């Protein structure tokens, strides 16, 4: 029997099972939280600095003021829900009509630690407006915000794919500036986090419930007993802790919840999956943001490690 182990096969299998820190060249430059203590159970308040890539979004004009949440994905780019960029044109008029129109970039700002960040441009998929009525918007409800100036905060990593079977092995946190109580409209504008799990629609019991509740266009869902998104959380993500706990990734953009009691009866919230828009995000950010596979490292990292090992043996 040949007992010689093929190094390449052994190493790749080891990486897939246990993970490995490949140093600066093969470690994402994103998704690292500062070493601060925080409370997360049940949606407790978190200091803003503990989630540096989560910003509150404010959209304001004479007709409307509303709030959402956004995710910083580069020094001058952020993600949010596309529907956060629209307002009811007739909201300030004595009319029973409804007509949602687009905000101008100067009407939108990001807020963090008493700082205000202005928006230069924003982008959303063309299909969002075509499908913005009813449940048809879920697959397209995300937008890219281009900031006027760079932000020094750590961005979140953007995931290239979502594995529903691997997700249970990682810490998952819903973080946002939304309401804390589903039965009030009073917003304290405090950042909160709670453990909420991601599910692929149609997969498993929760995924099947999500598909039954929201229809065939639902792709990605979030649910946990007595926890979930509320008004003001649109645009945030459920941040998944990958790479041995060192990096957080975003897999989706929060789009919709059931009014009154969102996930309190395990009715899942709906998220727009990011993985389907990786090429679009890379294009709109001028190659500044690239999606990363959170489960398997680039093959060049394996070769780098092997070469380093061979050099150390001589």
Image (cartoon, helix red, strand yellow):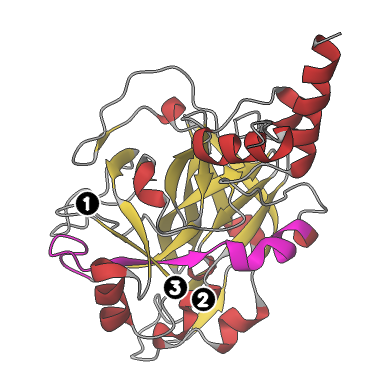
Contact flag, marks 2 and 3 (Cβ < 8 Å):
yes
Magenta region? 259-282
- Residue tagged 2: 139
Q: Which residue is mark 3?
A: 219
Which of the two discs, 3 and 1, sits closer to the camera? 3
The residue at which mark 1 appears reads as 186
How far across and how far down the image is residue 244, in percent? Answer: 49, 30
- Is residue 298 shown left or right of residue 134? right
Characterize the local packing of mark 1: few (<14), some (14-19) or many (20 or more) Cα atoms within 10 angstroms.
few
Residue 262 lies in magenta, yes or no?
yes
Asked whether residue 215 appears in the rendered view, the answer is yes
Residue 63, picture quadrant: bottom left
Q: Quadrant of residue 15?
A: top right
Residue at 58 percent across and 54 percent down: it is 79
Q: 94 or 36: nearer the eye? A: 36
* Residue at the spot 68% in from the left edge and 61% down from the top edge: 278
Q: Magenta stretch containing residue 281, yes or no?
A: yes
Which of the two residues, 203 or 103, is positioned nearer the viewer here?
203
Q: CA distance from mark 2 to mark 3?
A: 7 Å
In the rendered structure, the answer to whether residue 260 lies left or right of residue 77 reads left
309 vs 36, left or right, is right
Which quarter of the image is occupied by the N terminus?
top right
Q: Earlier in the sequence, mark 2 or mark 1?
A: 2
């Amino acid at each position: 029997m040949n007992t010689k182990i093929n190094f390449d096969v052994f190493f790749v299998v080891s990486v897939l099972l246990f993970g490995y820190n490949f140093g600066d060249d093969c470690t994402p430059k994103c998704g690292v939280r500062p070493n601060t203590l925080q409370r997360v159970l049940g949606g407790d308040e978190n200091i803003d600095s503990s989630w540096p890539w989560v910003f509150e979004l404010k959209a304001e004009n004479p007709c409307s003021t509303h709030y959402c949440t956004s995710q910083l994905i580069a020094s001058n780019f952020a993600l949010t829900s596309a529907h956060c960029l629209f307002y009811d044109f007739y909201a300030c008029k004595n009319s029973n009509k409804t007509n949602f129109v687009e905000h101008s970039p100067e009407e939108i700002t990001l807020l963090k630690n008493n700082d205000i960040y202005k928006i230069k441009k924003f982008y959303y998929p063309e299909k969002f407006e075509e499908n913005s009525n009813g449940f048809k918007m879920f697959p397209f409800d995300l937008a890219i915000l281009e900031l006027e100036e760079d932000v020094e905060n750590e961005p979140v990593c953007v995931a290239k794919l979502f594995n529903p079977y691997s997700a249970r092995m990682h810490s998952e946190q819903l973080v946002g500036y939304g309401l804390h109580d589903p039965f009030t409209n009073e917003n304290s504008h405090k950042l909160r986090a709670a453990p909420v799990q991601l599910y692929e629609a149609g997969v498993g019991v929760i995924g099947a419930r999500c598909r039954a509740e929201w229809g065939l266009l639902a792709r990605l869902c979030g649910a946990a007993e007595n926890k979930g998104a509320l008004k003001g959380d649109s645009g945030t993500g459920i941040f998944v802790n990958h790479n041995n706990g060192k990096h957080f990734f975003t897999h989706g953009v929060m789009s919709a919840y059931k009014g009154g009691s969102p996930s309190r009866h395990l009715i899942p919230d709906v998220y727009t999956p990011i993985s389907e828009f990786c090429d679009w995000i890379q294009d709109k950010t001028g190659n500044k943001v690239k999606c990363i596979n959170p489960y398997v490292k680039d093959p060049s990292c394996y070769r780098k490690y092997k070469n380093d090992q061979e050099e150390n043996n001589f």
